[in-house]
Image (cartoon, helix red, strand yellow):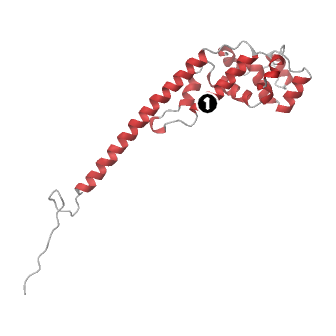
Amino acid sequence: MSSPTIAITQNETGKSSKGKTTKTEDQKHAATLVDAAEKTTRQEQEKGETELLVNTLLVAESQIITRTVASLIDYVMFIVDARAQLKGKSISRLQFDPWAEFQRRSKGGPTQISMCLSIAKRSALLDPENFAKLPVSLIALYYIASNMSGSEISTRIKDGTINMDLTVEQTKTLVGKGTKTSKKVKAATKKAV
């Protein structure tokens, strides 16, 4: 009887495969690292492109002059468009949110942007036929938009309650907000477009 031979398999590196990583596993790990590096590079490139878009929008925003209702509504629609372009493009791995960055660096800041988004929800305020009847104040338009329904706004425009001579204080009284202005709105007023 002959004795059985024990064969120890060796991998491509010549080492025993028992308890050791193989070259194939090392290659898989290296490929994973390369993929992660490429993904990070793509995300950094995307961040750079998105930062350029944010900067372009901020320059455009700085050039908007708001001295008429039409120009205020143009500004409101500009903010809506900027949000559409930037929202959802955040890169969490790089901790970059272009919409938050735009709001932070905007000339009116997050509060004013919030006001614009509230105004944009009321079609009666966006109707060019009503521009001559609306107050030339982003804050007054905000109080109207955030405290009245669309049909109530239309009715009040038609009966003249909402008119171009309406002050912020009168608007607040009209919508039942009293005459105190919040600190955030005061700060937005100082930055107002």
Question: Which residue is at the front of the view, 78 or 187?
Answer: 78
Residue furthest left as drawn: 2
Which secondary structure, mark 1?
Answer: helix
Question: Which residue is at the front of the view, 121 or 178?
Answer: 121
Q: Quadrant of residue 139?
A: top right
How crowded pointer 1 is (Cα within 10 Å; few <14, some 14-19, many 20+) is rated as some
- Any part of residue 86 in sight: yes
Residue type at numbered disc 1 = Arg
Residue furthest bottom as drawn: 1
Q: Residue at x 89, y 21 (%)?
A: 161
Number of numbered tags placed on the structure image: 1
Label 1 sits on residue: 83
Q: Position of residue 148 (x, y in %)?
A: 82, 30
Q: Residue at x 63, y 19 (%)?
A: 108
Q: Quadrant of residue 172?
A: top right
Question: Is residue 14 placed above or below 176 in the rendered structure?
Answer: below
Q: Residue at x 53, y 35 (%)?
A: 89
Q: Is residue 159 left or right of residue 138?
A: right
Q: Position of residue 175 (x, y in %)?
A: 84, 25
Question: Is residue 5 placed above or below 78 in the rendered structure?
Answer: below
Q: Is residue 148 left or right of residue 52?
A: right
Quarter occupied by the N terminus = bottom left
Q: Quadrant of residue 184?
A: top right
Quarter occupied by the C terminus = top right
Residue furthest front as drawn: 129
Residue furthest right as drawn: 159
Q: Position of residue 128 (x, y in %)?
A: 78, 22
Q: Residue at x 76, y 17 (%)?
A: 69
- Any part of residue 149 in sight: no
